[in-house]
Amino acid sequence: MNEQITSEQQGDAAVDAEAILSCMQEAVVYSDLKGIIRLWNKGAEHVFGFTAEEAVGQSVDIIIPEKLRKAHWAGFNKAVEHGDILSAPGSRMTRALKKNGDALYVDMSFAMVRNRAGEMMGSLAVARDATARYMAERAARVAASGATPAG
């Protein structure tokens, strides 16, 4: 049986998606094909320090450290051309910036977003602050090796 989705159900789905995104602790950032932030949830406000009002409409460069931007944009453009991310699935540790300029480590996963017609729309990133975990793991590695930690 082929069921049609009514406009009321579509509206409910949009409200549900908004409610879901708003309560997630992880940062959820959607950017268009030009890298302009179009969606920024409460989790992103907490992780990166920018409010949605400050972030939406800005380039994702606001959270990408200067030294990583060239690599980010090369990967982003290849993913757009290819139609999907080219790295292995799952999250990866990377550096990011907070509004106050502090650097942090984040576990981040990416996906390319298509509309119902299959057209590429943008990129979705989900991130979690992993700075404390990264620093603890680094300290444990240094202690296990007997080396003195570098500043």
Image: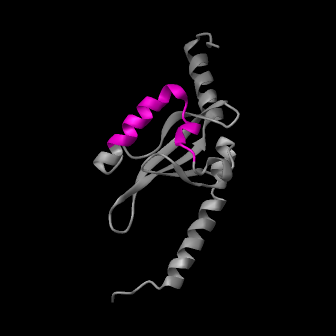
Residue 54 or residue 145, whichever sits in front: 54
Question: Is any atom of residue 87 visible in this view?
Answer: no
Residue found at x 63% / y 27%: 135
> Residue 71's image quarter?
top left
Q: Count all numbered tags in the image, as a single digit.
A: 0
Q: As drawn, is 96 to the left or to the right of 35? A: right
Scheme by which the image is coloured? one colour
Does the rendering let one see residue 131?
A: yes
User: Is residue 88 inside the magenta stretch?
Assistant: no
The spot of residue 35 in percent (x, y) is 47, 45
Compared with 90, 68 (above or below) is: above
Position above or below: 43 against 86: below
Residue found at the very far left of the displayed protein = 82
**Image quarter hosting the N terminus:** bottom left
Question: Residue 109, image x and y in percent?
Answer: 47, 46
Out of 3 and 34, give the one closest to the viewer.
34
Residue pictured at 58% horizontal, 38% vertical: 62
Main SS of the magenta part reads helix
Q: Which residues are magenta?
A: 58-78
Residue 81, image x and y in percent? 30, 46
User: Is 66 colored magenta in this rendering?
Assistant: yes
Above or below residue 74? Residue 54 is: below
- Image coordinates of residue 128 in percent, x first then y, are 59, 44
Q: Residue at x 58, y 17 (%)?
A: 142
Query: In the image shown, does 53 or 84 lie closer to the viewer?
Result: 53
User: 86 or 8: nearer the eye?
Assistant: 8
Q: Which quadrant of the rendered structure holds the C terminus?
A: top right
Q: Residue at x 40, y 86 (%)?
A: 4
Q: Is residue 8 left or right of residue 46?
A: left
Left-right relation of 128 to 89? right
